[in-house]
Amino acid sequence: MAFSDVLEQVGSTGRFQVLHVVLLCVPVLMMASHNLLQNFVAAVPFHHCRAHSNVSQSQLSPEEMLLITGPLDQAARPHKCQRYVAPQWHLLANNGTFSSGDLRETEDDLDVGLQGCEDGWSYNMTAMTSTIISEWDLVCDQRSLKQMGQTVYMGGVLVGALLFGSLSDRYGRRILLLISYLLMAVSGTCVAFSSSFSLYCLFRFGCGMALSGNGLNTFSLIVEWIPTRVRTVIGTITGYCYTIGQLILVLIAYFIRDWRWLTLAVSLPFYVFFLIAWWFHESARWLVLNNKPEQALKNLKSVAKFNGRHEEGEKIDINILQESMKKELSSAQGSYSYLDLFRTRRMRTMTLAVSIVWLSTSFAYYGLAMDLQKFGVDIFLIQVIFGAVDIPAKVVITVCMSFIGRRPSQSGVLIVAGTSILLNLLVPHEKQLIRTCLAVVGKGCLAASFNCCYLYTGELYPTIIRQSGLGWASMMARVGSMVAPMVLLAGDLVPWLPGLIYGGAPVLSGVAAIFLPETLGSPLPDTIQDVEDRGSGRRPKKLSKETITLQNMETDLLKLPA
């Protein structure tokens, strides 16, 4: 009797599984809120230097104060980072009838002195009533700190993936999920009450770590309590929960415009999730593999009782349970590491190409998704569009992978994404509709690329190091998401450079994907030698039952959120 048979005996798709999956999927809705929170809490409002104290106390209108306080920029708007050393009262002589060109000529003729915003900035808070930008003046010389905040958060996601991934294998999925929920709740609450930008970054780092713990352990607990035949459906539901979460964030942000209250609103639900998570049952598979068959048996009997199969559950004993996991126990005895990903020439080539694909996909995805204001469209509207495009994108890429193949789908979607971003460089800024459409196409293709990455990578690596391969690829993706915000700073020197980098990276990685082997219809490799045989063109071995099960599990990974 295999473990799947034991699961069928206690009820594999009963009331327990339905409630279990629902309770695990609900927090996924809020994961997107933290992942994309920066778009709203760090939105940059229009700003200019605050008027001199003697000007502020005068009876001048706001337009007249701006006129005598600072120069105009190239767009004929008040300069964001400079003002006159002293108020230029003479500019009121013509009662504010100067044209923009006349004002600049007057400034040159008088050789007026300029200085920074010594008295701070005035902000036009239309989209949000408060952001971290307006609260801590993260503009002008301090504007790079905005991108640093997102980089720190993504650093937390990377550390969390490494930390929670290993700890969950050692201490269990349930306890690590509990810790992740509590960490997200506490860190998010602390972010909302941060008194300085340094503390804000520190607690956002904690949120990033918690996000990784939530994602990893949620997926493990879901797939290890349901049968193979429904994993694809459940995986699809889980993936679309993340997509819907992007739309929920817009709704919450639309009604809560203060960044502190918004952060608190998306963090408080995790206290409730933490309390609910105490009901979750630890994975029986993990318990058996970690020499805890008694607890595994207790959990299985509890599930059987919940599903109305109490008598069937009582027929299971420890011997039956250990016998059902004999193959898994024997396969867990091997010792492998990340070095095996580079053991042979074909493994090195494959790992290099996979690394490039994952890094560039994440790099370009977050480069687009975290800089919505550059499109000149309402940030609430553009976030809805960017979130909704993931729905058809995931459907199209799934069909393409099934009929065209993994390699052409992966390569093609990356090249199309990069081309869309590069074409945006040629479109004038006033053509906002065209620029937005191209960006939406690029973002949708990158979301589709993420889906393809999960499945393709799982099929490329052999069973003995598949988790190592997926872990390595995920790490490269987190590196890309960390670097992405910092590239935006290059736009201060060369405005078109970030777009060139964001567009060039997917195109190059699309070319790199061509060097990966096609896996559509091929059996999953179990050993490194199987990978070598596949590359040499030798006929692969017959597909085994265990391989079919693993392939179904890896197929479900494509439904994970980006």
Image: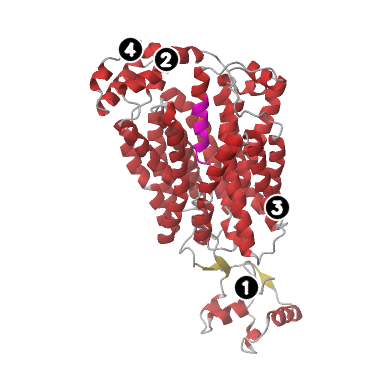
Please give the range of residues in magenta: 551-562
Q: Is there CB contact under 8 Å for labels 3 and 4?
A: no
In space, the residues marked 2 and 4 are separated at their CA atoms by 11 Å
Q: Which amino acid does label 2 sit on?
A: Met
Residue 123 in the image: x percent, y percent? Answer: 53, 68
Q: Real-space Cα distance between discs 3 and 1?
A: 31 Å
Classify mark 4: helix, strand or loop: helix
Name the residue tied to disc 4: 318
Q: How far apart are marks 3 and 4 (CA)?
A: 60 Å
Name the amino acid, label 4: Ile
Q: In front: mark 4 or mark 1?
A: 4
Which label lies toward us, 1 or 2?
2
Residue at the disc numbered 3 = 422
* Farthest bottom residue in view: 94
* Residue 120: % across, % down: 56, 66
Q: Quadrant of the N terminus?
A: top left
Disc 2 to disc 3, C-alpha distance: 52 Å
